[in-house]
Amino acid sequence: MLKGIDVALDPTPTQERLMRQHAGAARFAYNAALAHIKACLDRHEKTGWSYYGLRRWWNGNKDVLAPWWKENSKEAYNTGLEALSNGLTNWWKSKTGQRKGRRVGFPKFKKRTKAKRRFTYTTGVFGIIEGDPYGLKLPRIGRVHCMENMLLRTKGGKVTRMTISYHGNRWHAALTVDVSETVAPRRKPEGSVGVDLGIKTLATMSDGTVECNERFLRKAQDMLRHEHRALSRKQYGSNRYRKQQSRLGRVENHVANQRRDRLDKLTTRLANTYADIHIEDLNVQGMMGNHKLAKDIADAAFGTIRTMLTYKTAQTGSRLHIIDHWYPSSKTCSNCGAVKATLSLNERTYHCEHCGYTIDRDLNAAINIKNHVAPSAEETVNARGGNVRRDSPRVAVRNPVKREPSSSDRCVGLGVSAGNGGMLTKTN
């Protein structure tokens, strides 16, 4: 099993200069190969843009294009060529209809001031140093000190790929490690849970547990605004401009670290506690169309939660179940199964008009997500409001589209007692 590990580096000034030089070499190879491809297309010449085809072209022309190429590892140039090959392939597949999603444009030249500093090692002797837990070997750069014990992090796994990048005012190493054995959780996961994601509460579990939304981006908005305003007053490209960019980057990186730490703890707790986890396949891109909620939706990072649960459940032996996002979990009564035709976002308490059942809106959705069993293809119609065959008759036949999440700024604990008795109220 492949596992990703990210660790912060602590290079010396000389090593940091060499890292910037390697990242620049990757950018140079990318731009040189892109200029070659564009020239061939303008002349209507037949050319290939596979990774190995670009490597053959680079090896045949590098002495003329970059006489200094020996100063850097060959892996730096291969990083730029691989990125260009992937970009051209994605563009062509998108143009010919072989790739789903948004249209992918033709690759553009990378600017030195805007391109992300990054290069990758895939061959050679790199990575873990035997007997040196706090060091990583980078060819042509040397032994670089890292901030964590890598022998404990990798647990004896083999490093197959290592990407060095600069973000958040710090150099990082992202290692792909081939781990042969899965680390067992502290206790065997058991039980099942449905998770409803939202903005008012980040996650509401079907057992009544609530994870509040800290809204880290909203809290840092004033500081970010101050740093952006200070940056706009600096002359572009000056030393003060670069220093202010670093200050802004530190604030942005702090917000990102806060968010990631919160999501890591939430998903780890779910993967270690429950054997079956049910979540919705939310259309995040469509939800971002609501400009009043777009910032909060982006800050909640619903896609990151799903990504983390995907690999963490594989490590702990739990099972992740994805519910179709057309399933009306918020509008369906978890007691009798009746479906409401409409349900506005400001209705935070679900009241069933058929059976009189009253329950918190998010908890009702989480229970429905947990109890929902995805039907076969013959039983569904994949359209807006597609019909879903049920085992028992329902009152409403219209299947509305779920339009979540909430926009309220307050985050209130539900105060659930044992068996959800403290939160559920049944009326006649």
Image (spheres, rainbow, N blue to C red):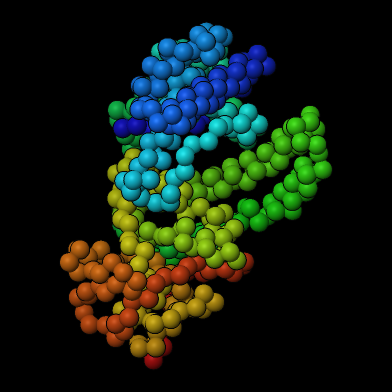
Tell me if residue 63 comes above or below residue 174 in the rendering.
above
Q: Which residue is at a point 44% across and 21% down the rendered structure image? A: 78
Rendering coords of residue 128 (x, y %): 45, 17
Q: Say whether residue 228 is left or right of residue 117.
A: right
| Quadrant assignment for the C terminus | bottom left
Tell me if residue 334 comes above or below residue 110 in the rendering.
below
Rendering coords of residue 192 (x, y %): 31, 58
Rendering coords of residue 187 (x, y %): 35, 44
Rendering coords of residue 350 (x, y %): 45, 79
The answer, for residue 46, to whether it is visible in the render is yes
Foreground pick, 208 / 398: 398
Q: Residue 14's image quarter? A: top right
Q: Which residue is at a point 58% across and 42% down the rendered structure image? A: 257
Residue at the limit of the structure toward the bottom, as seen here: 428
Q: Which residue is at a point 63% across and 34% down the rendered structure image? A: 114
Foreground pick, 206 / 69: 69
Q: Say whether residue 106 is left or right of residue 180.
A: right
Q: Which residue is at a point 57% across and 31% down the rendered structure image? A: 110
Tell me if residue 140 comes above or below residue 192 in the rendering.
above
The answer, for residue 80, to whether it is visible in the render is no
| Quadrant assignment for the N terminus | top left
Foreground pick, 370 / 69: 69
Residue at the limit of the structure toward the front, as seen here: 43
